[in-house]
Image: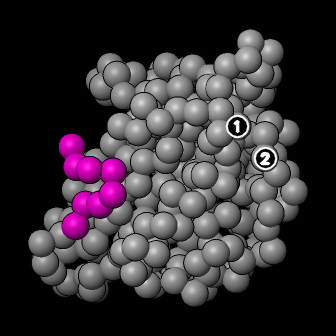
Amino acid sequence: MTTRRTVIAAGLGTAVASSVPSGNAQTAQKTFVLVHGAWHGGWCWRRVADSLQRQGHKVFTPTLTGLGERSHLMSRDINLDTHITDVVNVFKWEDLEDAALVGHSYGGWVISGVVEQVLPRVGSIVFLDAFMPDDGTRGLDNTSEFSRKGILAAIERGDVSRPSPSAAMFEVKEQDRSWVDSKLTPQPVGVALQPIRLTGARDRVAKKTYIRAASYPQPIFDNYLAICKADRTWRTFEIPCGHDVMVDMPERLTEVLVEVA
């Protein structure tokens, strides 16, 4: 397992044939910033990061404050701005340019806020079975009923976090469920209580993509997919697997990410 900061390719290499767009024998090096969702951490991108690395790409998989290997930093002070800053600082300290910014699930909130601050450095943005919030909305008001109940229950108890569901709820393949369950950590409650402030930077990114996990039932994501399909400035994909696409179908996801970056 790598550090939360980065998975860096040793150099340019020949791309895996199955992951290269038709007609290309080699893929130019690209930079990816992969942002995980609720209860997860940078660890969940391991298979995709390895696949991208083998093709010579540079990959950053930051773990958001209070989660994964940074779970010891859990605090009631963590809010959405904290997580946005976690990723903005990767762009700042690593001097990233023309990066593909990818957000999974809750990570859609984070990357929507990140691009507001680093738009010139983002070459493409990808929402992977993710939320696409509107200006002024909160996670508490724009989420599944399961998450809403969990957030409200945690607030009532005075807790700073809410426990994770099982990997089975995400429709993770059975052979990977014990591994995923062993890595999931509580999600900070404060991130769902702060309204996000957006000015439309997300829509000004040159390349925009929405990827839907077709086997995971979530009407909210179905709605985002429909919106993006109706907008010619967006590309859309549907991958036949559960919510944790990076775990269930990493090679296919790698293929799509390279294509749209």
Residue 2 sits inside the magenta stretch: yes
Q: Label 2 amino acid?
A: Gln
Read off the residue under disc 2: 194
Q: Which residue is found at the position 60% from the left and 58% from the top?
A: 84
Q: Which residue is found at the position 72% from the left and 57% from the top?
A: 132
Mark 1 and mark 2 in contact (Cβ < 8 Å)?
yes
Magenta extent:
1-8
Q: Residue furthest top?
A: 157
Figure check: 184 above or below 66: above
Q: Quadrant of the C terminus?
A: bottom left
Viewer can see residue 149: no
Percent position (x, y) of residue 119? Answer: 61, 81
**Is 234 on the left or on the right of 102, as rendered?**
right
Magenta span: chief secondary structure: loop
Percent position (x, y) of residue 232? Answer: 71, 79
**Is 121 on the left or on the right of 217, as rendered?**
left
Q: Are there few (<14), some (14-19), or many (20+) residues within 10 Å of tag 1?
A: many
Q: Which residue is found at the position 31% from the left and 65% from the top?
A: 59
Residue 53 sits inside the magenta stretch: no
Percent position (x, y) of residue 13? Answer: 13, 77
Read off the residue under disc 1: 190
Q: Label 1 amino acid?
A: Gly
